[in-house]
Every structure is written in structure tokens, then in C-alpha cells.
Amino acid sequence: MNTPLRCVVDTSVCIKYFIADPLTTKVNQLFGHLANPQTEIFVPDLFYIESANVMWKYVRAKMYTEAEVQVDLATLKNFPLRVVSTADLMADAVMIALNHNISAYDACYVALSGQVGAILLTLDAKLVKVLNNSDYNICLFNDFELPALPSI
């Protein structure tokens, strides 16, 4: 029997679902787990505006269209992600940020990971390196072994 997937993902991982990249296939596999109702993929509520901002940057760089942004934001909004309010994370996030000299935005994902007891998946190698010797459960997405999708 397969263990359901339980993790926190940041925008750096999720955006690869929409913007073609060598990791897109792996991200598609990650989000394929959402078909399992026991899967829990957590994000702080700031995840959505961060994703929109990354898409905006791609449009400005003429690597993505406004029409694609609207379609992809609608798709993203419909993913059954477990959304946690940053209001519930900010106290922990600011302490993590201060203690590890990282942004409060990044620390928000770290705080969420700690609060829900799930691994944080990111493509931010600098963040992983900074927290490498801490008690936080963080993994570079490239190195994460995705569990097999449950058979139906």
C-alpha cells in the first residue's frame, strides 16, 4: 500500500508545471498525486501572488503570453492545495528569517513545513544550503524521490 504524499511546495517548484523546463515532467508527477484525496500539498496563501508574479516576469520577458497567464492562474486556483494563512505563519516565519538570515517570504514556507510536519520541496538551492544543518525538513526538489502514484 502506498503512503499518501504530504509536503509543502514553493513557487519555484510549482511554476515548472506551467513554464516548460527539464523538471516539468517531475512536477507533473508531483501534482498527479493530487488525484489521491489523501494527498496533502500545503502552501501559504502568499503562494498564489508569488506564482502570478513569476508569470508576470515571464510575460515581461516575452517568454509567455497574457492569455496563458489567465488560463494557468485559473488552473492553479483549482488545484486542491491545502492553503494556510500567512497570518498563522508570520510569527514563526519572522523568527526563522531572523535566525537564519533569510527572507520572511522564504521563512513562511519553512514555518509552514514545521507547523504541518511535512517536507518543504524547493528549487532554491541557497535556501536548502542555509538550512542544511538546521532541524527544518527541507529538500531540493531535484533530489526528492517522488513516491509511486497509487494504482487505481
Image (spheres, rainbow, N blue to C red):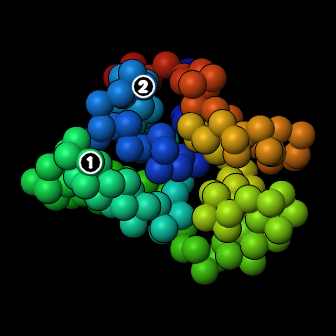
Q: How crowded is mark 1: few (under 14 residues within 10 Å), some or many (20 or more)?
A: few
The residue most toward the front is: 61
Front residue of 63 and 118 = 63
Q: Give how far apart the Cα atoms at labels 1 and 2 are.
A: 20 Å
Where residue 129 sits: x, y (%)?
77, 38
The residue under label 2 is: 23
Q: Which quadrant of the structure image shows residue 78?
A: bottom left
Residue 15 drawn above or below residue 100? above
Q: List the residue tagged with mark 1.
A: 61
Q: Dot 2 lies on which element?
A: loop
What percent of the width, then of the height, locates residue 16?
38, 37
Point out residue 32 in the picture as x, y percentages from the top left corner: 36, 32
Q: Can you see residue 61? A: yes
Point 70% across, 45% down: residue: 127
At a point 57% along the width and 31% down the height, the residue shown is 141
Q: Looking at the rendering, in which quadrant would you find the C terminus?
A: top left
Question: Residue 50's quadrant in the figure?
Answer: bottom left
Q: Is residue 43 above or below residue 37?
A: below
User: Residue at position x 64%, y 44% from top?
Assistant: 120
Q: Is residue 62 above or below residue 97?
A: above
- The label shown at residue 34 is none
Q: Amino acid under label 1?
A: Ala
- Amino acid type, residue under disc 2 in the picture: Leu
| Kind of element beneath mark 1 | loop
